[in-house]
Image (cartoon, rainbow, N blue to C red):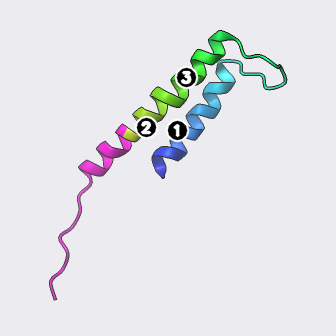
Amino acid sequence: KVARAIAFVVIGVGLDIVGLDLSQETVSSAAQWGIVLLFGVVVGLSFVAAGWFIYRAEIPDPLEN
C-alpha cells in the first residue's frame, strides 16, 4: 500500500512536470513517453523498493504457547 501511495504521488507530480493538459484533445508525443515511463518504470521501481524494504524488515519469531 505504501508503494502504491508513493507511486501515485510521484505520478501526479510527474504528469504535471511533463505538461499533461487534459483540456486538449491530443497529447504530445513527449507527454505520451512521460506517461509510459511514469506508469511503467516508476510504478515498477516503487514495487521493487517496497519489496526490498519488506525483505529487510525484521520479523520476530512467533511465541510458542
SS for dot 1: helix
Q: Quadrant of residue 21?
A: top right
Q: Tag on residue 46?
A: 2
Specify the amino acid type for callout 1.
Answer: Ala
Task: Check contact, mark 1 vs mark 3: CB within 8 A.
Answer: no
Q: Mark 3 — residue?
A: 36
Looking at the rendered structure, the kind of residue marked 2 is: Ser
Element type at mark 2: helix
Q: Of the two numbered discs 1 and 3 on the same chain, state the one appearing first in sequence.
A: 1
Q: Is residue 42 magenta?
A: no
Q: CA distance from mark 1 to mark 2?
A: 6 Å
The residue beneath circle 1 is 7
Q: Position of residue 23 (x, y in %)?
A: 84, 24
The answer to whether mark 1 and mark 2 are in CB contact below 8 A is yes
* Front residue of this view, candidates 31 and 5: 31
Front in this rendered view, residue 2 or 43: 43
Q: Which residue reaches farthest left?
A: 64
Q: Nearer the viewer, mark 3 or mark 2?
A: 3
Q: Residue at x 54, y 30 (%)?
A: 39
Instruction: Give the residue type at disc 3.
Output: Val
Task: Give the number of the mark in front: 1 or 3.
Answer: 3
Give the side of residue 38 with respect to residue 19, left or right. left
30 up-or-down from 6: above or below: above
Q: Position of residue 15 (x, y in %)?
A: 65, 26
- Mark 1, other Cα within 10 Å: few <14 / some 14–19 / many ≥20: many
| Magenta region, residue range | 48-65
